[in-house]
Image (cartoon, rainbow, N blue to C red):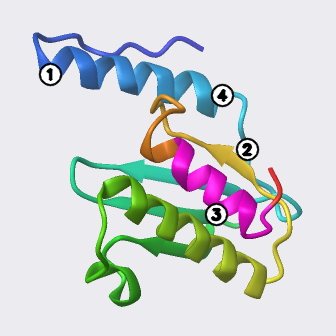
Amino acid sequence: MSVSVKIGKGNAYKSAARKRRAIRVRKRIVGSEVRPRLVVTRSNRHMVAQVIDDAKGHTLASASTLDVSIKGAEGDKTELAKKVGSLVAERAKAAGIESVVFDRAGNRYAGRIAALADAAREAGLDF
């Protein structure tokens, strides 16, 4: 299956490259009822993590830097990403989820993405 992404200039080129990577990653990663998908969405200011069952199309657990428990927290964006990772892992464990498939959504596995994943692993989520 071929998917075309329009390429622009400057930041548009970066977003087009991220979209291509996201399509490439999503071809292989599918969340199931046994191992749902942990999706990480990163913006310049916020991080959102969701555990999604693709078979049903339901979000099973989620956490964000916009949550009340994290929103007023001190620290840089990497520290907030760690808090989001541990919070989404706690909520997933409460929902009975032990193992997930990690979907980085085309973002490079570095910085805030890696910090969130490491914090989720430390909190007991297996992937």
Front position in the image: 24 or 84: 84
Q: Is residue 78 magenta?
A: no
Work out how far the residue at label 1 is from the one at label 3, CA to CA, in angstroms.
29 Å
Q: Decide: is 15 above or below 99.
A: above
Q: Which mark sits nearer the N-terminus, 2 or 3?
A: 2
Residues under numbered marks 2 and 4 in contact, where contact means CB atoms less than 8 Å apart: no
Residue 28 appears in the picture as rendered: yes
Rendering coords of residue 55 (x, y %): 74, 59
Q: Amino acid at mark 3?
A: Ile
Give the side of residue 102 with respect to residue 81, left or right. Answer: right
Q: Is residue 120 magenta?
A: yes
For mark 1, what is the residue? Answer: 11
Main secondary structure along the magenta-highlighted residues: helix
Q: What span is in magenta?
A: 114-125
Q: Amino acid at mark 4?
A: Lys
For mark 3, what is the residue? Answer: 52
Rendering coords of residue 113 (x, y %): 49, 44
